[in-house]
Amino acid sequence: MTDTNKQPLQVLSVDIGGSGIKAMVLNETGQAITERHRIKTPHPPTPEAVLEVIGQLAAQQGAFEQVSVGFPGVVQHGVTKTAVNLTAEWIGFDLAAALTEQLGKPVQVANDADIQGYGAISGKGVELVVTLGTGFGSALFVNGHLVPNLEMAHHPFQKEKTYEQQLGRKALKKKGNKTWNRNLAKAITNLEKLFNYDHLYIGGGETKRIKIELPKNVTMVPNSAGILGGIALWKDWEG
Ligand code: BGC
């Protein structure tokens, strides 16, 4: 028997970033059905302060049944394990449980680059995703399946600096566009040799600074992928 009372799935997708927290509601096919709202990330960005902002965003967005959250650090089973660009209080914080209690809806939390990836990939072959924003995000997919917890950000890159130290927003501001672009070109060469990917996607707010010519198997994805991928968490969960 068909359940005629079944409501279409509406997911509130939230992206916690180092400079802004964004939210919008998506339908089952991952399309936005509300306007995206953004509130500046509070300072200091403690769990309490960030939860307060998410509460405000949720109230502006109207009706939804489930929630997906992209977090700028490692997430395991809803618990945030690292938070280099937020505060130390996030380490070991059960964000999924805290938000479920606050919003009264089921919540899934995942790394922000993973969500960005879900919103960008084609689902074929080895696809790597990196994001250029406050931090340096990374996610790897094989035939559309996520290889969990890939963290390139704090891994050595060159000149005893990590990928994030050379390609994060601080480095961009300090060294300028030219050096940052040169480093990006080197990083792409490294990553291609390391992962032998079929395709690399580059997302995040700072893609607008990219001036180098990208190889054929590398494309930029709009920043909106970071929030549009939110539906995938629930699709994966439901099998
Ligand atoms: C974190 C990653 C995150 C990236 C982008 C890095 O500092 O370690 O987990 O995906 O920033 O926010």
Image (cartoon, rainbow, N blue to C red):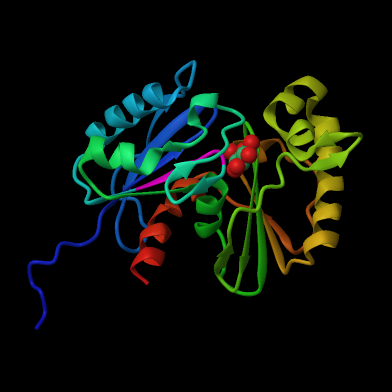
Task: Give the residue at x 84% y 31%.
Answer: 178
Residue 144, percent from left and from top: 55, 70
Q: Is residue 72 magenta?
A: yes
Residue 137 in sight in this render: yes
**Most foreground residue, 99 or 223:** 99
Residue situated furthest right in the rendering: 159
Residue 53 placement, left or right of 224: left
Residue 204 in sight in this render: no
Task: Give the residue at x 46% y 24%.
Answer: 41
Figure quadrant, ligand 1: top right
Residue 12, percent from left and from top: 31, 46
**Most foreground residue, 137 or 22:** 137
Residue 195, percent from left and from top: 77, 63
Q: Is residue 178 above or below residue 121?
A: above
Residue situated furthest front in the rendering: 92
Total marks in image: 0
**Most foreground residue, 148 or 24:** 148
Q: Is residue 209 above or below residue 176?
A: below
**Most foreground residue, 76 or 187:** 76
Q: Quadrant of the N terminus?
A: bottom left
Magenta-drawn stretch, dominant element (helix, strand or loop): strand
Residue 217 placement, left or right of 93: right
Residue situated furthest top in the rendering: 43
Q: Quadrant of the C terminus?
A: bottom left
Residue 210 placement, left or right of 98: right
Q: Is residue 133 magenta?
A: no
Q: Is residue 208 above or below residue 192?
A: above
User: Which range is magenta?
Assistant: 68-73
